[in-house]
Image (tube, rainbow, N blue to C red):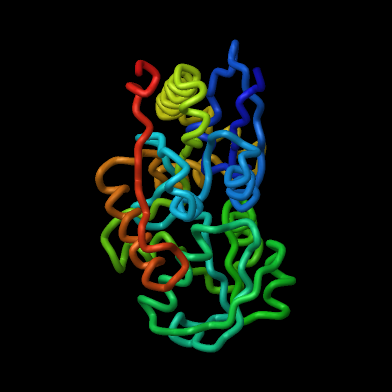
Amino acid sequence: MKPIRIGEISYTNVLPVFHFFDSSNLPIEWVNHVPATLNQAMSKGEIDLGAISSFAFAEHSDRYYLFPNLSVSAYGPVGSIFLFTKDKSLQELDQASIALTNASASSVNLLRVILEKFSGVKPLYQVMEPNLEQMMQVSDAALLIGDDAIRAAWSKPHYRAYDLGELWFQQTGLPMVFAVWAVRKEIVQKRPELMAEIYDRFMRSKESGNQEPMAIIKAAQRKVGGEVSYWKQYFAGLSHDLGERELEGLQLFYRYATELGTLPPEIAIQMFQLSFSKS
């Protein structure tokens, strides 16, 4: 039988869930890439489950289940999703040119909500490779996510950086859910026991990550660099849960995106249940 292909976002923000995953005796393959690539691969059936953009889940909610209690969320500053500007306020970005990273789905659409819904401005967007200097040469502002955003914030302090998680929380009082763990319904129907086992191992990996934060920090340092104090603060600002508050924030994000016309009006959030493996 074919191995199960699991998507892993290639950023440090998912380390607390993936780092301690025990893949022994599981017929799985890992696909490590940026969110936009994983989103597309999942929609095509090239991967079966894993971490994808929360926005991408909404685009295909009729075909996916959500894994409960797993996400990349923030109750305030997320620390790795920044809009960089040439010292412009958000209100000064009306008709301005904004370069968007080609690695993202949730953050690109969150930026539109923040600018168009919250700030009342209508910029002009273009999608580019995530290179801040090249983006800023042709634009008034640039959106970067993940480790690209972290490195840019470290090395380009002369730009003003807006944290999208912070801007969302200031307006809504709710967490922003950037990524979720999803599984294709088709694969749950075919191999329910294996899906239940994989979900259980993700939850155990997350628990180990919570119990051993220094191991997560060292893994982040190997990947990106930086000081222990930075990573302690960074991971403290993230939530990897998906409870009632996260779901409330997620549904509000979907509502705003629907009002902007970027999501369909009917989005069904269906959770994976362990009972699927017993039916």
Image location (x, y in percent) of residue 82: 53, 64
Residue at x 41%, y 39% (from the top left corner): 66
Choose between 162 and 23: the one closer to the eye: 23
Left of 175 or right of it: where is 111? right
**Is residue 126 shown above or below 174?**
below
Q: How many marks?
A: 0
**Is residue 242 shown above or below 190?**
below
Query: Is residue 139 in view?
Result: yes
Left of 151 or right of it: where is 172? left
Left of 125 or right of it: where is 77? left
Image location (x, y in percent) of residue 227: 57, 44
Image location (x, y in percent) of residue 223: 66, 40
Residue at x 48%, y 65% (from the top left corner): 109
Choose between 2 and 247: the one closer to the eye: 2
**Is residue 192 shown above or below 53?**
above
Choose between 122 and 27: the one closer to the eye: 27
Choose between 255 and 219: the one closer to the eye: 255
Q: Quadrant of residue 236?
A: top left
Q: Quadrant of the C terminus?
A: top left
Left of 59 or right of it: where is 274? left
Q: Quadrant of the N terminus?
A: top right
Query: Is residue 205 in view?
Result: no
Outermost residue to the top: 25
Image location (x, y in percent) of residue 138: 71, 80
Residue at x 59%, y 55% (from the top left corner): 150
Residue at x 45%, y 21% (from the top left corner): 192
